[in-house]
């Protein structure tokens, strides 16, 4: 009997360990209270305001380019984040260079208001950190609005495969309407249309806000 109990204890421990390893590899975190509605570039530690209120500059050395509040990448980080693979806060919030260039006047945006990258080096950096534009109706990313979350509080992504809470987030966050324009199939004609539409919509939105 004792042997059977030991065996099951071993199995349960191995299951927990495997789940922790998956959580670590997926970067599974619990969002701090102040961003429990979702993560985006604007509430990320690496965002710096520019003179243009619609865009910021990402000071993370692996990104180093203009981003908008509608964007998100795998390096998102903030004070108060808790990891789901061990105790303590995410490391890496060391001091960084306070570089804040002025955005060029013709900075292109995609349909949801994310910056569209055109230079090869920028596209490559964006791809490497999975820099996406959040869908129009999503202000910030968290498990509750991720395509992999189930209503049972379980993550269906095989890289996570464990119970989750609505205010968790990991590197696999995704949604069918997330935009990865340069490395997920939009050709330049489609992009032109997207940019024109976005500019129009942003203008209309600003007008609406003015009229409130
Ligand atoms: S691009 Fe990534 S690191 Fe930079 S501000 Fe956005 S989420 Fe943060
Ligand atoms: S639901 Fe999405 S964001 Fe949450 S752990 Fe699963 S894949 Fe990651």
Image (tube, helix red, strand yellow):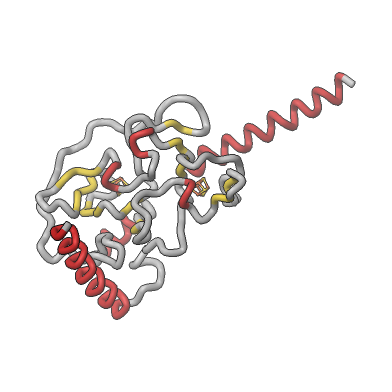
Percent x, y of residue 92 = 34, 33
Residue 128 visible (yes or no): no
Residue 162 visible (yes or no): yes
Figure label count: 0
> Of residues 188 and 176, which is closer to you in this image?
176
In the picture as drawn, the residue positioned furthest to the bottom comes out as: 189
Quarter holding the N terminus is: top right
Q: What residue do we see at 37% from left, 63% from top?
A: 180
Residue 198 sits in quarter: bottom left
Percent x, y of residue 193 = 27, 77
In the picture as drawn, the residue positioned furthest to the right comes out as: 1
Percent x, y of residue 120 = 27, 64
> Of residues 88 and 124, which is closer to you in this image?
88
Instruction: Give the answer, above or below, for where 86 lies relative to 112.
Output: above
Residue 38 sits in quarter: top left
Q: What residue do we see at 37% from left, 55% from top?
A: 138
Q: Is residue 48 left or right of residue 20?
A: left
> Of residues 30 and 9, which is closer to you in this image?
30
Q: What residue do we see at 14% from left, 43% from top?
A: 99
In the picture as drawn, the residue positioned furthest to the front comes out as: 212
Q: Is residue 17 left or right of residue 129?
A: right
Percent x, y of residue 83 = 46, 33
Quarter holding the C terminus is: bottom left
Instruction: Give the answer, above or below, for where 183 lies relative to 58.
Output: below
Q: What residue do we see at 12% from left, 53% from top?
A: 52
């Amino acid at each position: 009997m004792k042997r059977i109990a030991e065996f099951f204890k071993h199995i349960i421990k191995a299951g927990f360990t495997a789940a922790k390893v998956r959580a670590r590899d997926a970067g599974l975190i619990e969002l701090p209270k102040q961003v429990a509605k979702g993560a985006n570039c604007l509430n990320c530690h690496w965002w710096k305001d520019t003179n243009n209120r619609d865009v910021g500059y990402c000071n993370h050395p692996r990104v180093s380019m203009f981003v908008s509040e509608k964007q998100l990448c795998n390096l998102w980080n903030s004070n108060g984040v808790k990891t789901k693979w061990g105790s303590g806060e995410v490391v890496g919030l060391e001091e960084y260079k306070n570089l804040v260039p002025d955005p060029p006047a013709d900075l292109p945006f995609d349909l949801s208001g994310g910056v569209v990258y055109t230079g090869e080096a920028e596209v490559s950096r964006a791809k490497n950190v999975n820099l996406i534009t959040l869908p129009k109706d999503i202000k910030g990313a968290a498990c509750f609005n991720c395509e992999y979350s189930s209503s049972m509080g379980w993550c269906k992504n095989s890289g996570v495969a464990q119970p989750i809470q609505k205010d968790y987030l990991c590197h696999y966050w995704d949604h069918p309407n997330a935009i990865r324009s340069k490395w997920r199939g939009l050709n330049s004609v489609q992009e032109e249309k997207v940019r024109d539409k976005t500019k129009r919509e942003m203008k209309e939105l600003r007008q609406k806000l003015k009229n409130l």
